[in-house]
Image (cartoon, rainbow, N blue to C red):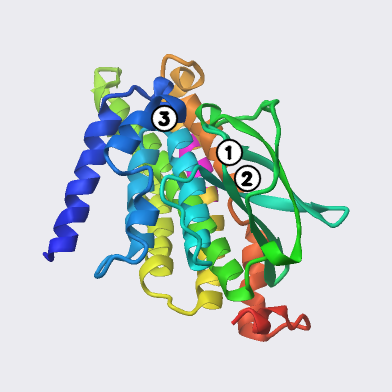
Amino acid sequence: MTENDSELTHLLQMVRELAAKKPYADADAASMLGPLDDTGLLDLAADTFELAGVDSLDWASRVIQEVGRESGSVAYFLASRYVSHRAQLRRGVEVFKRESVAAIARSADGELRSTTAPLVVTPAAGVLLEPTGAGVRAVSTTEFEVGTDAPKRTGLGGAALGGIRAVDRPDDRLSDPDASAACADWDILVASAALGVADAALSVSVDYARTRRQFGSAIGSFAGLRAIVAEMADQIDCARGLLTTAVTAVADPYDRRVAAAVVAARAGRAAVGVALSAVQVHGGYGYIDEFPVAGYVRDALSLRARCSSTLNARRLVAAERLGSGDTQAKENR
């Protein structure tokens, strides 16, 4: 084990100890700002971006997975912050201690407009990403409008979601390689948050199956339930394998974006599927707030909505394997 591997192991253990201090229902991002700052997790992506011998994206992904096992809201807040920091650092912008967010945007009348972003703190900078077929358009700006009304959402209740909008000015646009890299970061880190939630849903299901008894036996001994739990674990393992490949084995920016879109689509589906299976394992208890399972379902649904869709992933894979009438894919290489 190298020194950096040892540091990562220590960091993940610190995350576990930090997360264990907060019950799931209370682990909102605002209440965790102080501890996240004190432990260096708040600016981890910026601090490790050019650190020798460290894969900054791998560290960020693994930290977010660990945090997601305790709180999808905190994991999503960190994913948004990390993506924005990494995108700005690629442009040579100093981001130390800067409050920053990233979000998937939608076009409207020549503008880039996102539906929501985690507004735990008032951001001083933001990166808005808009996938456009085989390409991606992105702006990095300090000039945007932040909404005051937080729309009601299914999950991620602790992420203080609110509206944010920025005008698409040419001077603010990221270059095609930087835009592709930022989009890949987004898919990888939001997928990491989704897998963290899926891990949590699986863990509580295993514990419940071992302790809940019916007809004199633990329900974990029933063949039907064992098959459900095995399928939950299989979905997570498949998605995590794709995630590991996208993070550590793909160097080309466009190829990484394709791999990231695939893993995001798979991780989003896996998180929802695992969370719904957790409800099935818990029976009626899966629907009440005294158990965390319903919260996992809500967070998984919200995270899946922010991951690349299966349709988008298939479009990118098809363009990579078969070519595309749209030359944008080649231009982004």
What is the x, y in percent for residue 265? 56, 56
Determine which of the numbered discs, if any, sits on residue 301 in the image: 1
Q: Which residue is mark 3?
A: 281
Is residue 122 or residue 327 the one in the foreground?
Answer: 122
Amino acid type at image mark 3: Val
Q: Which residue is mark 2?
A: 305
Q: Nearer the viewer, mark 2 or mark 3?
A: 2
Q: Quadrant of residue 249?
A: bottom left
When the figure is inspected, residue 85 is found, relative to residue 273, above or below; the finding is below
Q: Quadrant of residue 146?
A: top right
Please state the total of marks drawn on the protein image.
3
Q: Say if the magenta span includes residue 248.
A: no
Q: CA distance from mark 3 to mark 1?
A: 18 Å
Q: Secondary structure at mark 3?
A: helix
| Residue contact between numbered discs 1 and 2, judged by CB atoms under 8 Å | yes
Q: Say if the magenta span includes residue 274.
A: yes
Dot 2 or dot 3: first in sequence order is: 3
Amino acid type at image mark 1: Leu
What is the x, y in percent for residue 282? 41, 25
> What main secondary structure does the magenta stretch of the protein show?
helix
Amino acid type at image mark 2: Ala
When the figure is inspected, residue 135 is found, relative to residue 298, above or below; the finding is below
